[in-house]
Amino acid sequence: MANVEGNLSGIRKSALDILESIYQVAVPTGQTITAELADILAKITAQLSREVAVYLNRRGQVVCVAVGDTRTVNLPEVSGRRSVYRLSGIRCIHTHPTGDSTLSNMDTSSLKEMRFDIMTALGVTDGKVTEVSFAFIAGLQADNDFEVQSAGPITLDDFVNVSLTFLTTQIDRILETRSKTTTLAETELAVLVGVERRDNWEVTDSLAELEQLAETAGAEIAGNTWQKRDRPDAAFFVGRGKVQEIREIRQETGANLVIFDDELSPAQQRNLEQAIGVKVIDRTALILDIFAQRASTHEGKLQVELAQLQYNLPRLGGQGLVLSRLGGGIGTRGPGETKLEVDRRRIRSRISDISGEIDQIKKHRSLHRQWRKESQIPSVALVGYTNAGKSTLLNSLSSAGVLAEDKLFATLDPTTRKIVLPGGREILITDTVGFIQKLPHQLVAAFRATLEEVVEADLLLHIIDASHPQYQEQSVAVFEVLNELKVKDKPVITVFNKTDKLAPGIVDSLLNEPNSVGISARHATGINQLLETIHSELRQQVIDMDLLIPYNDSGLLARLYDNGTVNLVEYVADGIMVKVSLPPDWAKPYQQYAVGEDNND
């Protein structure tokens, strides 16, 4: 028994028998349709008040029958010939119960995507075909998009007399000629999907950020949609009705990628790809792809590959459309892309190898940090939301020459520079990777060696893009990552950047927060005040002492140079007068030599 596809709910067996009988109808080769087939389609459409679609091959055989609703019908995948520069050899004829045969945007996008010989709509009124419209691919435009030509509305008799053979021969010849002079590059055109939940971010704001991420990765945005849910659907993350809507949006816009704003389980990703018919990725895969594009150092590439492998390992049990796309694209780039189709054992082995290499890097970094501790040079780390201006600030402070772009995750690899504070004290300042809401745990784990610069820092500068409408939500996301790194109790100076974009009154209200500074890193305004604030904060982390060291203990002077900052040395009759700044842990052994009151300013 032939299968009828689509929405069959509520259809009686007698109607199903009529639909199945359509498979027995034959159309002469080279003819578009017969009056008999058109009459059957019109009557069953009137009976059901639903759209009905049929596929016919070039031999005139019906190869598929599908039922939709009053306004649309989901078209099954074409099983005929599939080539960029050839038609599929299948024509689609479907009905419009409204009587209007005008082709919709979804109809024309389906024509281009599935490369039908022709796409036809029969306008049905009172069980009869009253008009016919059709469209066909007329060539390939300069921007690598198919050119579509439409005809109609015309009468059914006129449509029956259209020579299908002549039409398809001409189209195939045009496409074949064009294929010799052009290469069709598939653009990643994405539909974004979000879920509204009770958290700090509005779903529209989160989707706007997802759009920035997608554009950073190189995709174009075809549209977005979201759904309000208390908890994700176990099978599809969103409801089945929303999945149907996403499929329609994708079909109408011609999108070839769907990006979800939350992390999907392997089963959800697989189910969605099967239901929607294109590659589906989540926010985590998108961020990993951006990191793969931006990583330039050996360390950065190792950390990205480790994160990719950890993300892909549970998804090897049938990645569906992702693994079938050997051409790559968003979600498949980077050092880990060649590992997707190997077995779990080899991936676990590679994860172990990379982890070992990163451990070596960690040991190397720890040696540098040990040297800094012994030299008593304070360390300051720049932290903040991605694109808040951390790299621009580092350039303003030190002329570091770090890449600074108005893009998300413009730089990944940490950069450390030495600067001099007012009063002559030297410090090391480090630019770190930017944070983001829903930062993948794989990245936090993989970049732990890099993020240890934050853990070991004496002071954090929290850089905030004060001009961003969601700067408060971004600040919360930064502290969530800091909590995960267990550094929430570390001293922090809040630096409101991009104040040049704000009215003076707004800037003043921001600076009411304790230990905060307003700057414009791009225009280097407020930098001196920032340096003074850093100097003051670091001074609070040391104890200023006046010591009188007897000449017979003069060897202590060398230890003071090692353990603290010696500000003044004066030789007097009773010994050596020393003004020194010491960390609290080092101050106690010298307490016996202290004179006057200790200062801690």
Image (spheres, rainbow, N blue to C red):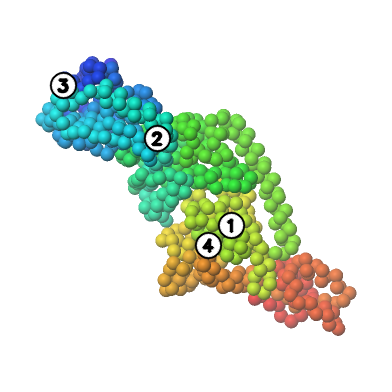
Q: First in sequence: mark 2 or mark 1?
A: 2
Disc 3, SS: helix
Q: Amino acid at mark 1?
A: Val
Q: Residue at the spot x=62%, y=56% of the render?
A: 415
Dot 3 or dot 2, earlier in sequence: 3
Query: Who comes first in sequence, dot 1 or dot 4?
Result: 1
**Which quarter shows the C terminus?**
bottom right
Residue assigned mark 3: 35
Relative horizontal placement of residue 378, taking residue 550 as reference (left or right): left
Q: Earlier in the sequence, mark 4 or mark 3?
A: 3
The residue singled out by tag 2 in the image is 278
Image location (x, y in percent) of residue 145:
36, 38
* Real-space Cα separation, disc 4 to disc 2, in angstroms: 39 Å
Nearest the eye: 4 or 141 = 141
The residue singled out by tag 4 in the image is: 463
- Please, what is the three-letter code of the amino acid marked with disc 4? Ile
Q: Secondary structure at mark 4?
A: strand
In three-dimensional space, the C-alpha distance between marks 2 and 1, rounded to whole angstroms, equals 38 Å
Q: Secondary structure at mark 1?
A: loop
At x 48%, y 72%, the residue is 512
Residue type highlighted by circle 3? Ala
Q: Position of residue 180 (x, y in %)?
A: 42, 30
Mark 1, residue position: 402
Give the residue at x 37% y 49%: 196
